[in-house]
Each structure stands twice: as structure tokens, then as C-alpha cells.
Image: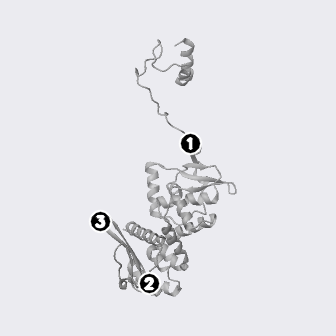
Amino acid sequence: MSKAAESLQRRFGSNLSESLGVRAGMPSGGPPMPGAFPRETSPDDGRTRAREAGHMEIDRIVPDPDQPRKEFSDDAIDRLAASLLKHGQLMPIRVRWNASIGKWLVISGERRYRAALRAGLKTVACIFADDGLSPSEILQEQIIENLLREDLKPIEQARAYRQLMDLHGWTAKELSGELHVSQGAISKSLMLLTLPVELQEQVDDGAIPATAAYEVAKVEDREAQREIVRRIVDEDLTRDATTEAVREAVGKPSRSSNSKAKGRGGSSSRGSSRVFKVEGAKIEVTFPRKSVKDEEVLAALEEALEQVRATIQAD
């Protein structure tokens, strides 16, 4: 290496040496044969730095008033605040600028933001959304984050679904494709919004399981709905017992009185059924009428799957 190159290397480091064709440890006689020396690696190899990431003073950030989640568990916030103090902030929050109030609004990560406030942090790590998100994109991002991390309360979830559908003019099927949530689950959720306000409050308070409330929503008569809910609370009705109470209220015969059809599919004077054999089990879907479309069978199976999932989550 020439004296001029050595001088430049001392001043500007190895990056300039590389641009001159000189690598650290290279013998003066020229480049080594391939494989003669192991390639030196750097902690910066493969690293990309996000221009939109950084820290922000917490008093310059406020919650989004349109956030679908309206209630947050104090115990959960306390636990997260303790974790922030012990381990630091492991995940940034996502924020957007609101020029009308001169503040950054939280898009996703409001639990972390609230916990950081409670922990007394002065700054928080953020991802800054500078690309002008539409109201629909913001809402969709918030819904997805809540669905993946900590479930919304049933009525909050239903309202968020409805708001997204109204913004885009989407059907439940189209919303299902956008959020990758089954159409049956979305349809059941939206039916909760047909209940009287006081029954919706009981659902969000946990007095009525969402799966039972969905069955109650099939009853059009408001007084009949209230009577079934009273029985759910006072008699601790199971989901099956609630279904039977609903069938009675709408004038349908009890399922226990229906005769079962045999084979892959069949019909009787009271209805029809489809039977599916899966590994180690047999699944039968019975309808109270003779004519049933394949789409209705699919919706019934999706609904049953959602009920099983809800039971697992409740355990």
C-alpha cells in the first residue's frame, strides 16, 4: 500500500480502502487466491435502516378518538408498564401526524402508549406514517392489530366491522376477503348490533356470552329477546339450551324431536341433513327444511367452528 493510501485510510477508514481495491489483511503482493482467507463480516452487513422509525416525546402523542377499542384493562396496562420499566419498549407504536391539533395520533399500539404514560417514560419508539393514510386504511389497520393482539369486545368488534363496510360499501363477503376473517364470523358479529342497547351492554360486560347473544338476535320480538336473556343470566343457560329457547320463541320445533337422516345426505318430512366423515369423527348438519343450498351448509359449518373457537378461548 502506498504512503498516500495509508494516509487516506488513517483519515477515512476502511470504506475508502475498499474503494481503492485494498482490503484489510491483503498482502502487498496482490489479492489472495479465492478461498485463501475467510471473508470478514460486519454487524452492518445486510442491515437496512428505516427512515420512518425513531423516538418521539410522549407529550406530543395523543390517542386516536376513532380507535375501535374504547376500554382498556387497568391490570393489563399496569403489567405492561412494569414490563416497559424492566425490559424497555420491545415494539414501537405506529403514529400519524394530525395538523389540525399539532399532535401525533396513535394508529396502533395504544396499550403500549398508555403503559408508557403510566410508567412515566418521556419518549417512546415510534413508526411514523408519513404517507397520508385514508380513514379506511387507518381503521383497517387498527382493527387488524386488535384482532391479532387482544380481542375487541364483541360489540366494539361489530361496530368496527360495520364502520369499515360503510366506508367502502363492502358486503360481509368482501370484508371477509379483506380481513381474512370468515364470512360467518362477520355475519354473526353484525347481528349483535340488532339487539337493544341494554342487551348489547350486557354482552360487552360479559353477562351474556357473544355466542348466546347471536342466537338471541335471531328473535325479532324485543320482549322475547329480553326474556331469553333473563333466563340466560338467571338460569345460566348453556348455548344448546339457549338455542332451544330461541327455536321455541320463533315457533320452530325442538331439535330433539327432529328425525335424523341417514347417509351422506337425506331428507325427512321435517327437514334435511348433510353428513361429513372426517378423521376419527362424523359431522352432521341438520336443517329444519328440505331444500338447503351448499352455501348454507358452509355457513353453518363455519358458525359451528367459530363457536368451538369461542369455547376454547373462554376456557
Decide: is 65 above or below 193.
above
Give the SS element for disc 2. helix
Mark earlier in primary sequence (1, 3): 1
**Residue located 68% across and 57% down the image:** 101
Q: Name the residue under label 3.
A: 280
Q: Mark 2 points at which residue?
A: 247
Q: Report the front residue among 302 and 11.
A: 302
**Amino acid at pointer 2:** Arg
Q: Report the front residue among 84 and 51.
A: 51
Give the SS element for disc 1. loop
Q: Residue furthest right?
A: 100
**Amino acid at pointer 3:** Gly
Label 2 to label 3: alpha-carbon separation: 31 Å
Left or right of residue 28: residue 63: right
Q: Name the residue under label 1.
A: 50
CB contact under 8 Å: marks 2 and 3:
no
Decide: is 203 above or below 4.
below
Mark earlier in primary sequence (1, 2): 1
Q: Which quarter of the image is occupied by the C terminus?
A: bottom left
Mark 1 surroundings: few (<14), some (14-19) or many (≥20) residues within 10 A: few
The answer to whether residue 142 is seen in the rendering is: yes
**Residue located 43% across and 21% down the image:** 34
Of marks 1 and 2, the one in the foreground: 2
**Amino acid at pointer 1:** Ala
